[in-house]
Image: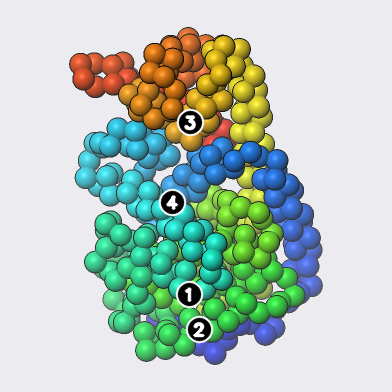
Amino acid sequence: MPPVNYHEGRFPPVDLKWPALIPLIGPAAAAVARYDGMLAAIPNPSVLLAPLSTQEAVLSSRIEGTQTTMGEVLEFEAEREVSSSERHDDIHEVLNYRAAMREAELQLATLPFSLRVVREAHRVLLGGVRGQHKAPGEYRRIPNWIGPPGCTIETAHFVPIGADKLDGAMGDWERFAHTETQDRVVQLAILHAEFEALHPFLDGNGRLGRMLVPLFLWQIGLIRQPMFYISAYFEARRDEYYERLLAVSRDDDWTGWCCFFLEAVRVQAEDNLTRASAILDLYQKLKVRVAKMTRSQYAIQALDWIFERPVFRSSDFITSVAIPAPTARRFLRVLKDGGVLTLVREARGRRPALFAFPALLNCAEGREVL
């Protein structure tokens, strides 16, 4: 079967079937609004929702073939060591995903949603990892194609737009991002599909395309922080995700893709709300409990620190939490004895103990993992 080629001349779509989309738009918008209301209630969401941001980076990277878990990423951040070079590369791709999101957020504080921001995020995403030699931050200047490992352009599943037409096509993509449309979430669905179809970079297109979902929702004011976690839906339905994207070019089925995307947004907004609510509830309960357990003015400082780093070395807690060292050591004993922290590894020689905060990890995963 010959490959599907990019849908040249058919972006943006002109014949969306709105009667099919309208029943999905309302529930998706309402779910996003409820989730945004939760974001408004969370003090310092960049700290409390840090595990969800890590989980999003893990799942988005897993769609592209990485095998690491959130626990492995957090343990690596604490330990800076890993069992194999392959797992080391997987973990660094996840860390780069988070770094690229932070860079894009910083850029968007002063710049509009633009190709400049996209290229800068891509530069960070590929820096120092397996794609570092694939022109980070620069559009490809050669053909690329999507298919099984080792396939040729003739045996690929999909062939994106030619490199000679890429600059103009990306300019059209940026202009569409700033066009007033009938519905902004449908607009985002179209932007995501078009970005993946153009495949403007030699590597990292899938991850960057998914990263653009929370960034766009934030920029148009549907959420107040760029914290929306979409990849779990796509990762759980990976085959349908790819098939819906392919059908845009093969069958001109923009409507089918938009229906799939709207349902993804609704389901993930509800899931995001559930997990964020659980994390906020955990934080509020522990504020009272940890204050009683430690009887210290430093209780909230310590709690905020472990929410941002739910797997950590004892030495890092003692030196980084801005609490007197004897008090910090006492905190670790009290929180472990009180069941807030779990001792993952005893201290041995010059190697410090490793602790985990299981209740937070379980909230972020949505299941018992520790």
Tell me the distance, in whole angstroms, between the alpha carbons under discs 4 and 1. 19 Å
Is there a contact, CB below 8 Å, between mark 3 and mark 2? no
Tell me the distance, in whole angstroms, between the alpha carbons under discs 3 and 1. 35 Å
Q: How far across and down, in percent of the image, does residue 136 sit?
A: 32, 68
Tell me the distance, in whole angstroms, between the alpha carbons under discs 1 and 2. 8 Å
Q: Mark 4 points at which residue?
A: 98
Q: What element carries label 3?
A: helix
Q: How far across and down, in percent of the image, does residue 223 sit?
A: 66, 55
Q: How crowded is mark 1: few (under 14 residues within 10 Å), some or many (20 or more)?
A: some
Is there a contact, CB below 8 Å, between mark 3 and mark 1? no
Q: Is mark 1 on a helix, strand or loop?
A: helix
Q: Which mark is residue 305?
A: 3
Task: Name the amino acid, label 2.
Answer: Gly
Tell me the distance, in whole angstroms, between the alpha carbons under discs 4 and 2. 26 Å
Q: Mark 1 points at which residue?
A: 115
Q: In this view, does 131 lie to the left or right of 49?
A: left
Task: Name the amino acid, label 4.
Answer: Arg
| Rendering quarter of residue 164 | bottom left
What residue is at 45 percent from the left and 77 percent from the top? 198
Nearer the N terminus, badge 3 or badge 1?
1
Total marks in image: 4
Asked if 212 appears above or below 45 in the picture, the reply is: below
Nearer the N terminus, badge 4 or badge 1?
4
Q: Residues within 10 Å of mark 3 (few under 14, many from 20)?
A: some
Tell me the distance, in whole angstroms, between the alpha carbons under discs 3 and 2. 43 Å
